Image (tube, helix red, strand yellow):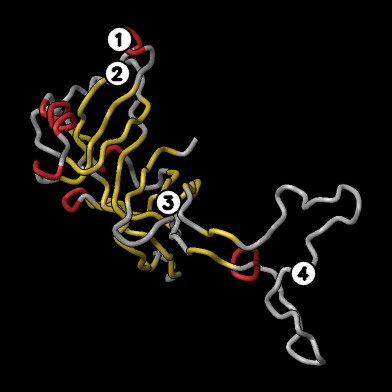
Amino acid sequence: MIESILAKKLGMSRIFGPNGLVVPVTVLEAGPCTVIQRKTTKTDGYEALQIAFVPQKEKRIAKPQQAHMNKAGKGMFRFLREVPASGDDEAAPGSELTVEMFQVGDRVDVIGRTKGRGFAGVIKRHKFSGGKDTHGCTSHRVPGSIGASADPSRVVKGKKMPGHMGNVRQTTRNLKVIEIRPESNLLIVKGAVPGSINGLVMIRRAR
């Protein structure tokens, strides 16, 4: 069974349930994804599919990738990713994966890259409380002491300190599919998913 599809995060909204409660949702444009290559145990040692998403102008694609995508005969694409598949799947190069592979009520994992925050201090990055603002305190947003005396005479690895924040791969698990709109390729899931608006995400069945 094919378990994954590429999607674009369109943003968040809300839906009113049958009981009148507000449900926060994320709207995802899932597919259609074109199968570019089928990898098998016989030829590659494992089962997988290379799927492409978002059509792209040919002049923006490198010549080796053009030749690779031309084998499917569906044009050029911006994103190319590999997803697991089983030996029973009959998806051939040129076929398409659509949002209809999911059903309302399914549980999915959404994988994306979080928003980049640049260089951040400990209060923003690690939720430190900070120092007092009164009574002569001069330590407001600094981390404080980081040493460990004469033993081990160094900063312990993993110490929470200022540094680069965000722009990392993140998986949000077990999101419920609230609604599917095949005519618009939209998949609406409950809750938030990582990434910025129009960012690329991967949707897979929850494990």
Relative vertical location of residue 94 with respect to residue 136 in this rendering, above or below: above
Query: What residue is disc 2 on?
Result: 39
- Mark drawn on residue 43: 1
Earlier along the polypeptide chain: callout 2 or callout 4? 2
> Is 87 placed left or right of 159 in the picture?
left
Camera-side mark, 1 or 4: 4
Residue that extends furthest to the right in the rendered view of this protein: 150
In the rendered image, residue 65, in percent from the top left (x then y), is placed at 18, 31
Q: Name the kind of residue labelled 3 in the image.
A: Arg
Crowding at mark 2 (Cα within 10 Å: few <14, some 14-19, many 20+)? some
Identify the element where label 2 is drawn.
strand
Identify the element where label 4 is drawn.
loop
> Is 140 placed left or right of 72 in the picture?
right
- Mark drawn on residue 144: 4
In the rendered image, residue 131, in percent from the top left (x then y), is placed at 75, 79
Closer to the camera in the image, 98 or 148:
148
Query: What residue is disc 3 on?
Result: 113
Q: Name the residue located 80 percent from the left edge and 50 percent from the top edge.
A: 154
- CB-based contact (under 8 Å), mark 3 and mark 1: no
Q: Quadrant of residue 143?
A: bottom right
